[in-house]
Amino acid sequence: MLRSKGPQGRRVACWASLAMLLPAAVNAEAPAAGPAHTVTFDRHSLIIDGKPTYLWSGSFHYWRLPSPESWNDVLQKMKAAGFNAVEIYFDWGYHSTKRGVYDFTGIRDVDRLLDMARDVGIYVIARPGPYINAETDAGGFPGWLVTTAGKPRTTAPEYTAAYREWMTQIDRILARHQVTDGRGTVLLYQVENEFYNDSDDGRAYLQALEDKARADGITVPLFGNHNTNFFEGVGKLDMPGYDSYPMDFDCTRPERWNAVYDFASERRGLKNAPLFFPEYQGGAFDVWGGPGYEACRKLTGPAFERVFYEATMASGSTMQNFYMTYGGINWGWLSSPGVYTSYDYGAAITASRQLTPKYDQQKLIGYMTRAAAPLARTDAVGTSVPENPRLRVTARVNPDNGTRFYILRHADASDTTDDATHLKVALGNRGETTIPQAPGTTIHINGRDSKVLLANFRFGQQDLAYSTSELLTQLHEGKRDVAVLYGRTGEDGETVLRYRDRPDVRMIEGKIDTHWDAASHTLRLNYRHEGLSRVEIRQGDASLLLLLGDNAAAIRFWQLDTNDGPVLLRGPYLARAAEHRNDTLALTGDTDHAGDIEVFTAAGTRTVTWNGKPVGTTATASGSLLGHLDGPAPVTLPALNDWHIADGAPEIAARFDDRAWQATDRTSTPNDYWDHKLPILDSDDYGFHHGHVWYRGHFTATGKENAIQLSANLGVHLGNHGIFTAWINGHFLGNNPSGSQQFPIDPRWLKKGGDNVVSVLVENTGHLQEEHNGAFREPRGLLSARLEGSDAAIHWKIQGNVGGEDLPDTMRGPFNIGGLYGERNGWHLPGFNDSGWAKATLPRATDKPGMDWYRTSFKLDIPDGQDVPLAIRIHDAAPHHYRAIIFINGWQIGRYISDVGPQTDFELPPGLLNKHGENTIAIASWSTAQDGGLGEVSLVMQGNYTTGLK
Ligand code: GAL
């Protein structure tokens, strides 16, 4: 392969290899390298194989979905909504438990993920860090880096050696999936993340990362997510990138609406690169005690998407990625301090993989970015202001073919009034025409809304003068063009097409007035957006089936690529893939209820199959095939009545045998964040990086001890909810959520002259994300302890997860468990025999602080061919003082804090379930006060679909 300067001096990658550009979904095995692809760019857009391409992309983290079969589901759902790219962070800490140890198998099989992306036919924007942020533990740095010397995100030699290890590993995989080599769909590569250190060292560091990526065989363009930094000089990236979260992250007031920032000046400032948003707000993360993700979905709902994403388009961006499109879950201890288990993000696709109205909205816009190819290359152009001053219009024109885009919204984007207007649009060379032309009709912007209207747009054999409806899609099938236009229910629509002579018009359905104007050679259609109207317009050999719908009708269309061209269908919940086999069209997809399916496909298709089964169809007046699809069979879930219980904290008792535990005897550490007393108590220094840690401190009592001062670092920034509980000789001393407290000791609890034991259980909420100061190295666990009333020395022992960095359970990996007694003894695992445990019923109240483990099992029998997203729900009538760690079949899928919230339903990724047999739930419940226990626990069904997912 070779790299050369492109026509405008840009860095360009050229290759000889692979086949089609973004192939239709293929059902094939791994392909050999095929025809060449080039990935270049200019100031307008990304250019793939010479074709300006509008990038419509969404973020997805495979490590937040420990279920590889579901990766395919998410990728197919994205592709079906018109996303042509998926942006993926690769999390260093997720793959590396210990220095030099890397795991890319099972749920960490990135090769498999990238193969899936290739087979789905979606580009990958790779973001391997080394630092990623992402609200994950240490922002993606591995646990072992906490105690490795060398300032992170600098050229420090120790840090350099560490990240080079990771880059070698991940780049090797990414390199073999690059679109440029024809082996995969990796399209772009991000270097670092939100890196703002513009010092000499910062630049040298960035340059070193770029050099390393290139040396590792990365040939696709390198870009940044660093806003205006590194446009020039040392560390300069091929493409800069902006991130923007205009609604910020406060979901408590979801009605809030912030100003729209116009990126037009940033656009103008970029001379050689497109305006690229590697992260534009797709939702928001929520915090412990927050309002929950439905509030975030409302804050960043369909109206926000419509107005802000189209404003970004209006300012000239042609590369938009939304963070997140599927958020997933912070299973195990993946979250950084502040955020809880669900990382649903209020995104377009829920954590349980369900489609929301946000998905529908993105689909409407995403389809247009694909159907209106001239949008990838436009310049801002002047235009008359709307007749109604409450509205504002921005115009853009494609310099090659004159296609114009008018983006219309309220001048004050937060306005909620319904405003009507006429617009002046430039049609060809004939000055401006006022539209709509039909007397008594107008264009509306009703509330927080935005519209992209097209003019002078040629597609197939058609010439659209303009439309006040929006374009969903257009395609050429057999001998005809098909176009779908849509608008808000009840609003007027006017579509004008140019013809040499008066065309034949055949009304198929609905009420459409037509008006032929011989002088301008235009056919004007006037209608109201309501349901779906259909008309066929024919002139000579050229024919157009025009489908005119309201938004609700438009979102029911799906367009799929096949090797014989595109297929349009209407009806089901989801369409995944299509393939022509002789005269059969094989479709796969999902339904949420029984209903119609209508297929618009080339004449000659005689049979349609859906998920492998034939669909009886009849031909319609629209030249389509109409059939019926079944909905899902009902599913009932078992009740969870049969619980077993065991005491989960024998460490509290003085007599507990801790001889095998490590003594905390270290007196030096490479971690310069340890500035506390010796010996070092930081759990990271003993290889325990995630989850609970126990400390047991032994001292010989004088009998005069009257209090103990304990300090811990729980990561209590950001209002997160770490805690520690302490006992002395089995007696409860108390809890502390803030990090430091003096606990009185009752002298009757002491064994004068004998061995006395302080037991401390610590829950921290993870390592901080890293800015530029090393904060991810902040110690975790106990910091210091001091007895009051005597000088007796305390000798501490520590116990975290079994093996520390040498994990026995590499399949579930470093984040799955910590050091609870039950975790150390496999109580979370499905094979554990709990028959000796006592029986319990839930809800159950306790009156003393401590730890109980609960186990039950249940049988599932999910009908084949159905997707039934399940969750475990914990319900408390009123908050109690306890926190529960929830395991399904050995996988930690939730952390519940009864008195903090907000999450009560914990998604069960399908790959962790036995869908036809026995499953085990284990819950460790830590009662932090006298009123603990465990609430009612049940299985809940979040949806029920027939599915084409294999
Ligand atoms: C971005 C960052 C992401 C994520 C996001 C908020 O600025 O790059 O990694 O943290 O903020 O969800």
Image: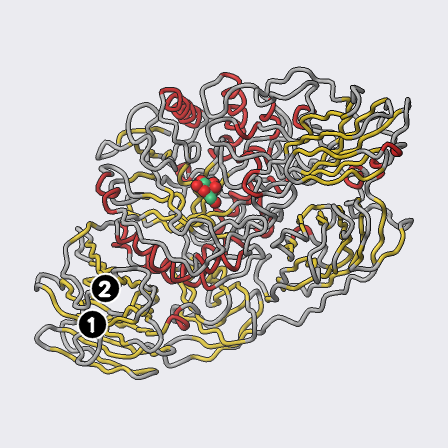
Note whether 507 is above or below 460 in the view shown. Answer: below
Which label is found at residue 231? none
Quarter of the image with the C terminus is: bottom right
The picture quadrant where one finds residue 721 is top right
Note whether 294 is above or below 738 in the view shown. Answer: below
Frontmost residue, 751 versus 375: 751
The picture quadrant where one finds residue 34 is top left
Q: Residues within 10 Å of mark 1 (few under 14, many from 20)?
A: many
Q: Amino acid at mark 1?
A: Val
Residue underneath mark 2: 391
Q: Amino acid at mark 2?
A: Leu
Q: Residue at x 38, y 51 (%)?
A: 56
Q: Is residue 729 left or right of residue 346?
A: right
Q: Position of residue 468 (x, y in %)?
A: 25, 69
Q: Position of residue 4 (x, y in %)?
A: 29, 29
The picture quadrant where one finds residue 417 is bottom left
Q: Is residue 920 left or right of residue 307?
A: right
